[in-house]
C-alpha cells in the first residue's frame, strides 16, 4: 500500500521566493492511521541554505519594518486567502501526515485563518504599537523637560519552530508566524518533520501572498531538517533576533540554553509542557459529580489528549463524593473509542510515560482501555495516588502527552494546598466548584494563581480562544517567559522592543507619534489615553 500526498508537494525548502534542494539528506512523513510512510521525499536544508534564508530575511527586514499597518494587513489577509485556495489538497495532506480527522483539519484551518485576520485587523487599526508621548516642558525648573515619544518597533528576523500537534494553527502560518509578521519581523520557519508536506503547502501560500502584495524577497522562508542541525544553526545565526517554539520541555529548554549562550543572547519564547491541574471542590462533586465525570472523560481524550492544555492532573479531597467521581470518570473514559496519535514516536512516548507513572510505587490504575486497537491508537488511562505520595515523587509531576490523567486524593484542605504549592509552572489551572463554596478556598486559589497563566472556573482547560485577553503561557516550565502569551493578539509583544525618540522634529517622527495623529490611534499623551491630536 502507498500513502500519497498531493503532487503539488515538491519536497524542497522555500528560501525566500525560490524553491531549493541543495542537500542530499531526505526524509518522508508518516501516515499513522495507515501505519505506513507517505510517498514524498523531503530534502533537508544544508547550512548554506539556512544561511541564505537568514541573510535574505535580514535584508528584507530593512524594507519590511517600514511598511504601514495597512500594507502588512493586506499581506496577512492575502495569506489567509491563499491558504483557503489550497483547498482539499491541504486538508488531505494534513490528515495523511497527522492521523487527525478531516473535521479537525478544517477546524484548525479556520483557526489559522482567523488568527491571520485578527492580526491584520490589529495592525491596520494601529493602537497595538503603544504610542506614548510626553511633551516638552521647556520652562521646567531646575531643568527643562525634553519631548520624549515611545513606540514598539520590530525586533528583527524571527525563527519559528512548527509544533507537531497543530500542523496548521501552531505551525507554518500559525500564531507565532502571524504575530511576528504583523509586528514587522521576517520569519524563517523550521518545519516540523512530522508534517513537512503540510508545511510546504502553507509556505507556498505565504510566498504567493507575499508576491501579490509586494513584500520583499526573504520576508518568509520555510526550512526542512533536523532540529539539532538546521534548528540549532538557525538559533545560532547572528542575524536571528528571537525564536518562537511549541513542543517538549527538553527541546524548548535546549534551544533556550543555546540562545542564551550565543555571543549576543536572544529571547526564546518556548511554550512547553503542562499538566494543567484541575481542582474539584466538595460541593460541586456532591451536586454535579456525575456530569463533571462525563465532561472530563471527553476533555482528557479530546484530540487523543495531544493538547498542551490537556487536563493531566485532577485534585480533590478524600470523600465518598470524590470516590464516586473517580469511579464515574473511570467508567466514562473507557467507553470512549481510542483515536490515532500523530506519529508512532509520539505513541511510543505516550506508552512509555504512561507506564512510568502507572508502575510507580503507590499509584493505582483505575482505568486502562483494555480492547485491542489499531496501531498508533492510544489507550486512555487514569491512575490515582495520595497527596503525600504525589508530593514526594517528582516523576509523578511530569506531563504524559496523550489521553491520561493522574488523580490525586488529598486527606484534607491543607494537603491540597501543599500539593498545589509543590507544582511546577502550568499553562492553566481549573476550579470545579459551586459559588457557595469558593470563598472557603481563597488561599488555595491564591496558591494556584502563583503557578498558572490562566485560571478556569467550572469549565475544561482544553479549548484556547484566540482573543486579546487570552494568556497561553505561564511560569516555567510551561513557558520560558511568563510575561508573554503565545495565543491571542497580545502575542505580538514578543517580537517588538520599546524605542524612544527624544526631541525629534515632528515631521521626522513615525506617523504614530506625530502631533497630528493622522491614524487616529489611541495614545498615552502626558499620561492620558486619547486618540486626539496634540
Ligand atoms: P519536540 O521534540 O520538542 O520537537 C519540536 C521541534 O523542536 C522539532 O522541530 C524538533 O526537531 C526541534 N527540537 C527538539 N529538540 C531539539 C533540540 N535539542 N535541539 C534543536 N531542536 C530541537 O516536540 P514534538 O516533536 O512536537 O513532540 C515530542 C514530545 O513533545 C511529545 O511527545 C510531547 O511530550 C511534547 N509536546 C508537547 C507539546 C505541548 O504543547 N506541551 C506540544 C507538542 C509536543 P526535529 O524535527 O529534529 O524533531
Image (spheres, rainbow, N blue to C red):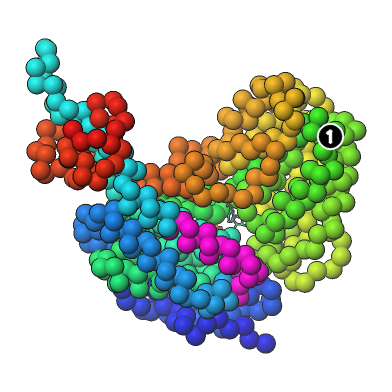
Q: Is residue 447 left or right of residue 373?
A: left
Query: Vertically, is 379 above or below 416?
Result: below
Q: Nearer the viewer, residue 95 or 357?
A: 95
Query: Vertically, is 420 above or below 351?
Result: above
Q: Is residue 149 visible?
A: no
Q: Quadrant of the N terminus?
A: bottom right
Q: Quadrant of residue 222?
A: bottom left
Q: Quadrant of residue 385?
A: top right
Query: Vertically, is 89 above or below 136?
Result: below
User: Residue 58, image x and y in percent?
Assistant: 25, 59
Segment colored magenta: 95-116
- Residue at image location 32% in from the left, 68% down from the top: 210
Dot 1 alpha-carbon crowd within 10 angstroms: few under 14, some 14 to 19, many 20 or more: few
Q: Is residue 383 left or right of residue 213?
A: right
Q: Is residue 369 left or right of residue 142?
A: right
Q: Which residue is mark 1?
A: 287
Amino acid at each position: 500500500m502507498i500513502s500519497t500526498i498531493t503532487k503539488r508537494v515538491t519536497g524542497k525548502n522555500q528560501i525566500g521566493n525560490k524553491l531549493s534542494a541543495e542537500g542530499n539528506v531526505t526524509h518522508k512523513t508518516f501516515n499513522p492511521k495507515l501505519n505506513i510512510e507517505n510517498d514524498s521525499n523531503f530534502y533537508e536544508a544544508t547550512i548554506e541554505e539556512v544561511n541564505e534564508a537568514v541573510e535574505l530575511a535580514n535584508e528584507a527586514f530593512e524594507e519590511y519594518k517600514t511598511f504601514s499597518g495597512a500594507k502588512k494587513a493586506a499581506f496577512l489577509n492575502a495569506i489567509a486567502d491563499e491558504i483557503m485556495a489550497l483547498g482539499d489538497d491541504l486538508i488531505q495532506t494534513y490528515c495523511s501526515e497527522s492521523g487527525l480527522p478531516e473535521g479537525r483539519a478544517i477546524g484548525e484551518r479556520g483557526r489559522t485563518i482567523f488568527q491571520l485576520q485578527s492580526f491584520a485587523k490589529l495592525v491596520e487599526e494601529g493602537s497595538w504599537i503603544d504610542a506614548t508621548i510626553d511633551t516638552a516642558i521647556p520652562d521646567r525648573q531646575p531643568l527643562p523637560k525634553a519631548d520624549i515619544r515611545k513606540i514598539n518597533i520590530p525586533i528583527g528576523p524571527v525563527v519559528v519552530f512548527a509544533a507537531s500537534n497543530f500542523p496548521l494553527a501552531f505551525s507554518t502560518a500559525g500564531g507565532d508566524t502571524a504575530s511576528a509578521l504583523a509586528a514587522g519581523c521576517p520569519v524563517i520557519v523550521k518545519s516540523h518533520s512530522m508534517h513537512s508536506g503540510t508545511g510546504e503547502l502553507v509556505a507556498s501560500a505565504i510566498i504567493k501572498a507575499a508576491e501579490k502584495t509586494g513584500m520583499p524577497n526573504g520576508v518568509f522562508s520555510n526550512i526542512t531538517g533536523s532540529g539539532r542541525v538546521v534548528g540549532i544553526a538557525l538559533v545560532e545565526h547572528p542575524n536571528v533576533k528571537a525564536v518562537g517554539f511549541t513542543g517538549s520541555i527538553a527541546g524548548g529548554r535546549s534551544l533556550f540554553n543555546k540562545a542564551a549562550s550565543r555571543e549576543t543572547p536572544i529571547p526564546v519564547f518556548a511554550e512547553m509542557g503542562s499538566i494543567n491541574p484541575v481542582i474539584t471542590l466538595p460541593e460541586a462533586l456532591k451536586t454535579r459529580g456525575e456530569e463533571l465525570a462525563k465532561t472530563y472523560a471527553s476533555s482528557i481524550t479530546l484530540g487523543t489528549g495531544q493538547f498542551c492544555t490537556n487536563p493531566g492532573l485532577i485534585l480533590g479531597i478524600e470523600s465518598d463524593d470524590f470516590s464516586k467521581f473517580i469511579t464515574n470518570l473511570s467508567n466514562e473514559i473507557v467507553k470512549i473509542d481510542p483515536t490515532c496519535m500523530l506519529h508512532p514516536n509520539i505513541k511510543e512516548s505516550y506508552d512509555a510515560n504512561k507506564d512510568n507513572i502507572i508502575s510507580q510505587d503507590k499509584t493505582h490504575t483505575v482505568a486502562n482501555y483494555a480492547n485491542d486497537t489499531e496501531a498508533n491508537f492510544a489507550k486512555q488511562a487514569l491512575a490515582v495516588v495520595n497527596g503525600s505520595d504525589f508530593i514526594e515523587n517528582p516523576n509523578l509531576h511530569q506531563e504524559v502527552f496523550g489521553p491520561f490523567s493522574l488523580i490525586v486524593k488529598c486527606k484534607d484542605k491543607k494537603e491540597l494546598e501543599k500539593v498545589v504549592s509543590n507544582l511546577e509552572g502550568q499553562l492553566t489551572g481549573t476550579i470545579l466548584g459551586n459559588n457557595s463554596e469558593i470563598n472557603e478556598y481563597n488561599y488555595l486559589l491564591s496558591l494556584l494563581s502563583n503557578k498558572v497563566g490562566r485560571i478556569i472556573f467550572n469549565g475544561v482547560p482544553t479549548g484556547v480562544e484566540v482573543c486579546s485577553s487570552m494568556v497561553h503561557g505561564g511560569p516555567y516550565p510551561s513557558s520560558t517567559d511568563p510575561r508573554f502569551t503565545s495565543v491571542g493578539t497580545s502575542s505580538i509583544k514578543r517580537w517588538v522592543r520599546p524605542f524612544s525618540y527624544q526631541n525629534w522634529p515632528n515631521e521626522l517622527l513615525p506617523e504614530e507619534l506625530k502631533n497630528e495623529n493622522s491614524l487616529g490611534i489611541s495614545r498615552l499623551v502626558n499620561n492620558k489615553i486619547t486618540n486626539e491630536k496634540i
